[in-house]
Amino acid sequence: MTARFVFRGLVVIGVVALVSYLLGDVIDKTWIDAHVRGQGVTGELLFLLIGWLLASVGLSRQLIAFLSGYAFGFVPGVLLASLAIVAGCITTFYVARYLLSAFLLQYFAGRLDKVGRFIKENTFSMTLLIRLLPVGNNGVVNIAAGVSGARGVPFFLGSAVGYLPQTLIFVLVGSGTSVDQFWQVVVAMALFVMATLLGAMLYRKYRHGMSLGPQLDHELGIDEPLLSADKHNGPV
């Protein structure tokens, strides 16, 4: 059943690579070329600022990683994308906790509670599981953790480590828009398969009866009854 997650992820990587190839001439004229690439520290800081703000409002972290790879290459791209994405995670977490908690719990308690309960206990390991699996919404996870009362540092560390495989993958795809793209995409797909299988294995082994939803459990081949208090909420 884990093959479904692998297939979905491979399709996404393939689509990103295809679009980058077809639009290569257009991408060369984009804002990144004008303001980021080749601009030294100024371009790096500008990318960090924009990436941080976009990650804070829920822009796909995979897209941020892809653009970072395109702008800076593999190693700097991984570092800058990771900093921007984790900074966005921290910002969303604390905005949800200290500014929007009452509103969010009033109108979205059902959806947020399932994720929050999953994360609150054993925060680092549970966050790592969520980040490794290609499921859910990054912004929703950040918000749910913020309003749940989960400890910040373990959540941020679990996120940073869990983000890394997909960050590596999409930076690699982005950095291959000009040079040796085919083999870089192949390597990215192989990394994605390994990260997904690792996440599924850890989820099965360490979820401790908690669940992110019956549909996810079914697709991962987990059929035992849920031990979490709420068995009726849908998946994240």
Image: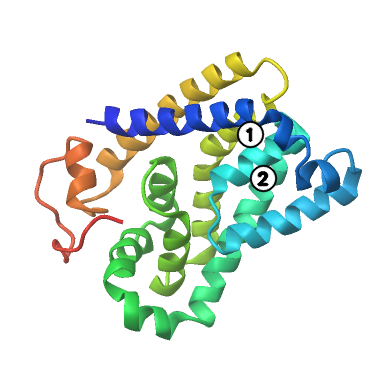
Figure quadrant of residue 118: bottom left
Residue 151 location in percent, x, y? 47, 66
Question: Which is nearer the eye, 125 or 165?
Answer: 165
Residue 25 location in percent, x, y? 73, 30
In what quadrant of the picture does the N terminus appear? top left
The amino acid type found where label 1 is placed reads: Val
Residue at 42% of width from left, 74% of height from top? 147
Mark 2 or 1, nearer chain start: 2
Figure quadrant of residue 21: top right
The amino acid type found where label 2 is placed reads: Ala
Residue 31 location in percent, x, y? 77, 47
Residue at 78% of width from left, 39% of height from top? 29
Residue at 17% of width from left, 35% of height from top? 221
Marks 2 and 1 sit apart, C-alpha to C-alpha, by 8 Å
Please indicate whether residue 34 sits to the left or right of residue 161 in the image: right
The disc label shown at residue 171, or none: 1
Question: Which is nearer the eye, 229 or 235?
Answer: 235
Under circle 1, the secondary element is helix
Under circle 2, the secondary element is helix
Please indicate whether residue 142 sits to the left or right of residue 31 in the image: left
Coloration mode: rainbow
| Callouts 2 and 1 close, C-beta under 8 Å | yes
Residue 167 location in percent, x, y? 58, 38
Asked if residue 153 is positioned above or below residue 68 in the image, the reply reads: below
Figure quadrant of residue 33: top right
Asked if residue 220 is positioned above or below residue 233 in the image, the reply reads: above
Q: Residues within 10 Å of mark 2 (few under 14, many from 20)?
A: many
Question: Which is nearer the eye, 193 or 122?
Answer: 193
Q: Which residue is mark 2?
A: 81
In what quadrant of the picture does the C terminus appear? bottom left
